[in-house]
Amino acid sequence: FQVIRTIHNVAQLSGRATHVWLVRRKGKYYVLKDSWPLQSKPFSEIRHLLKINQTILKDPVMRKKLKHKYPVLIVGQEFEDNTGFFRAELGAKIFPRVHRRIVTKPIGDPLTSFNSKFEFCKILCDVVEYLKYSSKDCFVCHGDISLKNIPIGIPYKTTSPNANSLTEPQTTSDVSSPTAAPTTPDVISPAVSTSCDVPVPISAHGLVIDNDNSSVILYLIVCQGTVPFMALESLQWEDTADFTHEPRHDLESLFYVILTICTYVDSPGCLRSAIPDEDERSLCLNEWWATLDGNLLARNKASHMTSLEHCVLRRLPPYWHDFHKYLIEL
C-alpha cells in the first residue's frame, strides 16, 4: 500500500497511540489503522470484522442491503510486539499493549458533514440497520458508538462499469477519514452547506467503524467506550467486572450522538457560535465533556434525560426545532 497522507494521529503518550493513513493500492483507496490496544481485551478487532464480513458475504440479500454500510476488512495483522516487554522496568502498573494493523474500506467524512436533515436521518437509519444485523446475526456488539466512530461514506466515481475500479473520491475537499472526526464539541469539523432540506436522492451512507471495543453478546466485559456517549448503566455500574454490554447500550449511545449533533451544529455547514461565558453553563451537554468521573456523569446525564425538554431541547438551535418531538419519543 502506498501512503497518501496522515489523516489521524493521536498526540498523547498513553492509550492506543492510534495512527490512521489514507493509502492507495492499484488505483483504489483504503484506510490503514495502526494501534496498540490492551492485551487484556478478550477479543480482537480483526476477529470481529472478519466475523461480520464473512456473515454478510454468505447472505446475498443482506450483502446487497448493507452495501457501503459496513467496514470491509481488506487485511489485518497482529504483530508480536508487546509493550510489556519493553516497559518491564517501569513497573507492574503499566498494562501491556499489543500491536495491531488493519486496512479497511470505504473512506468516510465526519458525521458533522451532513448536507441536510434528510441525509442526517438516512445516515442514522443506516447505522441502526447495521447495528441490528451485527448483533442479531453476527452476535457482536460495537461497544463504542461515538461521534468519531460514525462517519459518512463517500461516493466514488468509477472509470468503468466495474464498481470496484475506484478513482479519486467524489469531493472537492481533501478526503477525511472516518476516525478523523474530533471528539470535542468546540472543534467539530464544519459541514457542507445546502440551501434547504429537500428530500432528494441521498447517495451518502452511514458507517460504523473502530471495533477495538466490540464484544460478543452476553459476554461480561469491563465498561469501556467514549465517556460522553457511554450508556448510563455502563457509567454507574458498581462492579465493572460484572457489566454486560448489550445492543441496547449501543442504541443509547447513538441517541447521545444525535443530541450532540443537535446541540453543537446550528445547521449544515454552520457550527454553533461561541457562547458567552455567563451562558455557557446553560448548555447541559457541556458537562458531559468536562466530567471524568463515571458515577458523577451518570447522575448528571440521568437528570438531563429526566428533564430533557428543559435541560437540553430548549437550548438547541432553531434549526432543530422540528426534531424536538422525535427526540422526546426516542
Image (spheres, helix red, strand yellow):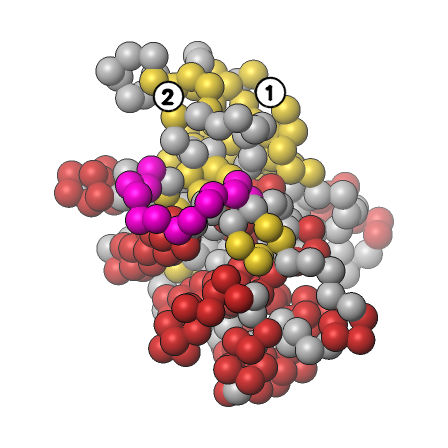
Which residues fall within the magenta stretch? Answer: 191-203
Dot 2 or dot 1: first in sequence order is 1
State whether residue 116 appears in this view. Answer: yes
View extreme (right): residue: 89
The residue identified by callout 2 is 157
State whether residue 241 appears in this view. Answer: no
Residue mark closest to the camera, 2 vs 1: 2
Q: Which residue sits at x=52%, y=43%?
A: 193
The residue identified by callout 1 is 4
State the image coordinates of residue 235 (x, y, percent, origin top left).
58, 76
Q: Which residue type carries mark 2? A: Lys
114 and 15: which is toward the camera: 114
Q: Which residue type carries mark 1? A: Ile
Q: Residues within 10 Å of mark 2 (few under 14, many from 20)?
A: some
- Secondary structure under tag 1 reads strand
Tell me, yes or no, whether the highlighted magenta stretch contains residue 6. no
Q: Which residue sits at x=55%, y=84%?
A: 310
State the image coordinates of residue 146 (x, y, percent, origin top left).
53, 58
Tell me, yes or no, whether the highlighted magenta stretch contains residue 195. yes
State the image coordinates of residue 75 (x, y, percent, origin top left).
44, 29
165 sits left or right of 191 in the view:
left
Q: Which residue sits at x=49%, y=58%?
A: 145
State the image coordinates of residue 207 (x, y, percent, origin top left).
41, 46
- When the figure is inspected, residue 264 is found, relative to residue 324, above or below; the finding is above
Q: Which residue sits at x=56%, y=66%?
A: 317
View extreme (front): residue: 195
